[in-house]
Amino acid sequence: MLNDPIADMLTRMRNANLQKHRYVDVRKSKMIQAILSVLKEEGFVKEFQMLEEEPMIRVYLKFDEDREPLLKGMKRVSTPGRRIYVKWPEVPLVRRGIGMAIVSTSKGIKSGFDARKEKVGGELICTVW
């Protein structure tokens, strides 16, 4: 039994980046799929696809020309034991705008930029840079 699948996904992606793997498999859930969609839209991951034979999602990581990962760091902010909620003006700028926050709003999972633009707050899931 896994208590925090989002933290597990972030840890798997962080470890795969450190080892410079092309892809990593993470557990499948609607929340993780929505977070990966935001990461893909913002250019932090190359692609992700559902695996047919098992309940996993294969995430293809993105690297620059020198084979350095584009995802430098990821941090889980809100945990199952301690939820962190923010209003739209309080959505943090991560690394002075280089990174981004991922927020679970009433309109779905959004990047911090989109949440501020649409003036919606919610649960601050994680930060990525």
Image: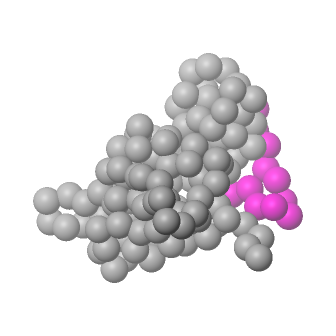
Residue that appears at 58% across and 63% down: 55
Q: Please state if 63 lies on the left or on the right of 35 as rendered.
A: left
Q: Is residue 63 left or right of residue 44?
A: left
Q: Residue furthest right?
A: 81
In magenta, the rendered stretch is 76-93
Verify whether residue 78 appears in magenta. Answer: yes
- Which residue lies at the image location 25% right of the left edge and 60% below the top edge? 63
Residue 100 in the image: x percent, y percent? 50, 44
Residue 108 placed where, x, y %? 66, 33
Q: Which quarter of the picture shows residue 23?
A: bottom left
82 or 96: nearer the viewer: 82
Q: How is the image coloured?
A: one colour
Q: Residue furthest bottom?
A: 19
The secondary structure that most of the magenta stretch takes on is: loop
Would residue 78 be seen by someone viewing this image from the given angle?
yes
* Residue 26 seen in the figure: no
Rendered position, 112 above or below 45: above
Please tell me which residue is depicted at 35% across the width and 44% down the height of the picture. 43
Image quadrant assignment for residue 111: top right
- Name the quarter where the C terminus is drawn: bottom left
Locate residue 113, reporting x and y percent.
53, 31
Count all numbered tags in the image, as a single digit.
0
Residue 122 in the image: above or below residue 98: above
Going by the picture, which residue comes out furthest to the top?
Answer: 118
Which residue is rendered at x = 45% and y = 76% of the image?
Answer: 15
Residue 11 in the image: state x and y as whole percent: 54, 72
Between 75 and 96, which is closer to the camera in this rendering? 75
Is residue 63 placed above or below 44 in the rendered structure? Answer: below
Q: Residue furthest left?
A: 65
Q: Quadrant of the N terminus?
A: bottom right
